[in-house]
């Protein structure tokens, strides 16, 4: 796997440069000429990293990374983001908040659950929606409304004991559902024990995972008379209950456990648990057992409690420290395949403009991996495998259970768009054709703003203020003189006469475009007068442009900005 330019090991050919990161405070003297310390090849790049100004690529080389907190933050104590009271309205209108909390809403939408049985999906009784089995796979379809629009999330939940055939059936049944819903489902792959907050919120803190296989229609099979369940969480969107081996060594002082025997259900409170944990445990106990409930405090257990667990045994008793939410910056990559190998090209300072309909893009937010599928992408069936490969080969040793989310162009959830600085929800809606605009159809009136945006996209207003560059650009584009266009590019500082003369003096030269030799592989100072160095390819004739780039100017400028830069560098126009 290639991670842009940030892959430091193992040895690679010169075309895939390595990086050695060093802190400015510990940088030693240079190695002797021709020698590379540590066995690295001589072409290995050495990148200096300043303390406090580390790049996202550098930070992600570590399993965890904590930003330095200010004095006020240290004195303030608790992390407010953990204790935010969910407001559905804010989650719908503030995508950034939804992305940070990983919640599209509070989980109060419509829920449908299917269990994979005999390689087919079987509906689960709504009364058992929150009861999953480790030996099975489940599909959970969540339907909600955002800003008046119906949206869907399909969770593909995979138990630790599920077989390969069941996992394959899970994916194929998910594809069938997606087709039934017109290809609009956001698909999130979830591994047992690593459920995202919204998945937990769907079941309102009553998710229980049994260590068994589900019987017909998702009903659990009979198990031993003594069972032990560990309850972890403090509210409806972070609580899960998992069955663990019924022995004393499974206990932990930081959590709450339910010990179910033939005659009684013990509710065991560890010394390190708090009131919120106790409240959630009392909700869960009604799901697991309806036997007589008996509360037991750690250190005050009756003899029968230990007998049911097979006797006393050591268990973790130290208070668990709160998990710190990673502060890694999100990273966006373009995915492609070369001779069967995944190749990733990082897009820095990314925006919505970098999402191209022909591409598959990987957005790494650390806690989740998003794979954005362009509507014209050809290898979208490989997307999940690419996400898994990315996690498997990541230098920081990422968890393979990290949720992987498939997002299709035009159906992005707020948890995805919240990672972008700005987002236009109407960017990929249908627009009137070019012919309709030219012919003056009724739809043309609504495209005035689009035409303005297109002009701005060519950055005519940002070109040199002497009026000449703008005039040359228009001539290269149109191949003719037009008084209204001259007015469009006239610079306030230059005056009308100078702009007109510029057009006249250059029309003969650029009618049809400048010669490619004048533009390719030329230093800025060697370019013809008036040519914008950042857009030199624009001055080619249409035929030369097609010959060099293999596409028309219209097709080229419809591509993502980063991809335009990439092609211009390769062809000598940068």
Image (cartoon, rainbow, N blue to C red):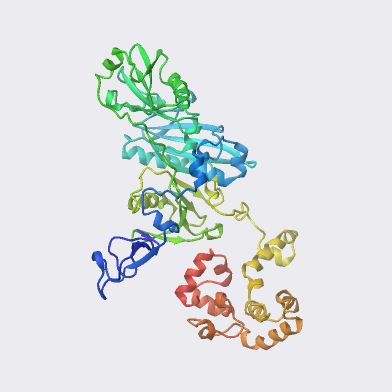
Q: In terms of depth relative to the viewer, which is nearer, 55 or 376? A: 55
Residue placed at 40% from the left, 38% from the top?
194
Residue 102 is at least partly visible in this image: no
Residue 468 is at least partly visible in this image: yes
Image x and y of residue 265, in percent: 37, 15
Residue placed at 23% from the left, 65% from the top?
39
Q: In the shown orientation, is residue 411 left or right of residue 399?
A: right
Q: In the shown orientation, is residue 548 left or right of residue 57?
A: right
Q: Image quadrant of residue 104?
A: top right
Residue placed at 66% from the left, 68% from the top?
455
Q: In terms of depth relative to the viewer, which is nearer, 31 or 470? A: 31
Image x and y of residue 133, in percent: 37, 29
Image x and y of residue 464, in percent: 64, 77
Number of numbered discs on residues: 0
Q: In the shown orientation, is residue 120 left or right of residue 511?
A: left
Residue placed at 54% from the left, 65% from the top?
561
Image x and y of residue 529, in percent: 60, 85
Image quadrant where one finds the N terminus: bottom left
Q: In terms of depth relative to the viewer, which is nearer, 77 or 257? A: 77
């Amino acid at each position: 796997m290639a991670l842009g330019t940030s892959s430091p090991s193992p040895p690679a050919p010169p075309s895939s440069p390595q990086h050695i990161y060093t802190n400015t405070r510990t940088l030693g003297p240079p190695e002797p000429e021709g020698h590379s310390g540590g066995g690295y090849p001589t072409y290995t790049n050495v990148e200096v990293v300043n303390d406090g100004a580390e790049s996202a690529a550098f930070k992600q080389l570590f399993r965890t990374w904590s930003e330095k907190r200010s004095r006020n933050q240290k004195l303030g104590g608790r992390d407010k983001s953990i204790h935010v009271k969910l407001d559905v309205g804010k989650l719908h209108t503030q995508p950034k908040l939804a992305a940070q909390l990983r919640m599209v809403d509070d989980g109060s939408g419509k829920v449908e659950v299917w269990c994979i049985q005999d390689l087919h999906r079987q509906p689960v009784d709504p009364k058992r929606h929150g009861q999953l089995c480790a030996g099975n796979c489940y599909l959970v379809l969540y339907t909600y409304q955002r800003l008046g629009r119906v949206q869907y999330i399909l969770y593909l939940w995979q138990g630790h004991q599920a077989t390969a055939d069941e996992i394959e059936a899970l994916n194929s049944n998910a594809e069938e559902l997606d087709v039934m819903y017109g290809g609009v489902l956001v698909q999130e792959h979830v591994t047992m024990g690593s459920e995202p907050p919204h998945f937990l919120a769907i079941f309102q803190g009553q998710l229980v995972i049994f260590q068994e296989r589900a019987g017909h229609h998702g009903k659990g099979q009979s198990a031993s008379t003594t069972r032990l369940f560990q309850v972890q969480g403090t509210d409806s969107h972070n609580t899960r209950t998992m069955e663990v081996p019924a022995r004393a060594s499974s206990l932990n002082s930081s959590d709450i456990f339910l010990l179910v025997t033939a005659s009684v259900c013990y509710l065991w409170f560890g010394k390190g648990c708090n009131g919120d944990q106790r409240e959630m445990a009392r909700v869960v106990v009604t799901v697991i057992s309806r036997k007589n409930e008996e509360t037991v405090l750690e250190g005050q257990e009756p003899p029968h409690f230990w007998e049911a667990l097979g006797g006393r045994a050591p268990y973790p008793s130290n208070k668990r420290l709160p998990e710190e939410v990673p502060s890694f910056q999100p990273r966006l990559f373009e995915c492609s395949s070369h001779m069967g190998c995944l190749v990733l090209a990082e897009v820095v300072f990314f925006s919505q403009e970098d999402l191209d309909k022909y591409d598959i893009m990987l957005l790494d937010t650390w806690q989740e991996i998003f794979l954005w599928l362009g509507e014209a992408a050809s290898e979208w069936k490989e997307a999940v495998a690419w996400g898994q490969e990315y996690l498997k080969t990541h230098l920081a040793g990422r968890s393979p259970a990290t949720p992987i989310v498939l997002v299709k162009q035009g159906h992005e959830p707020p948890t995805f768009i919240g990672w972008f600085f700005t987002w236009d929800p109407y960017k990929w809606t249908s627009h009137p054709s070019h012919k309709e605009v030219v012919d003056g159809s009724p739809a043309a009136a609504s495209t005035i703003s689009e035409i303005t945006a297109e002009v701005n996209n060519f950055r005519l207003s940002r070109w040199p203020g002497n009026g000449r560059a703008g005039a040359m650009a228009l001539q290269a584009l149109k191949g003719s003189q037009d008084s209204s266009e001259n007015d469009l590019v006239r610079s306030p500082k230059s005056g009308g006469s100078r702009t007109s003369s510029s057009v006249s003096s250059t029309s003969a030269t650029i009618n049809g475009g400048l010669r490619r030799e004048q533009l390719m592989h030329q230093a800025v100072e060697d370019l013809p007068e008036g040519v914008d160095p950042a857009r030199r390819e624009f001055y080619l004739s249409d035929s030369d442009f097609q010959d060099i780039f293999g596409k028309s100017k219209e097709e080229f400028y419809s591509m993502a900005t980063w991809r335009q830069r990439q092609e211009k560098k390769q062809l000598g126009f940068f």
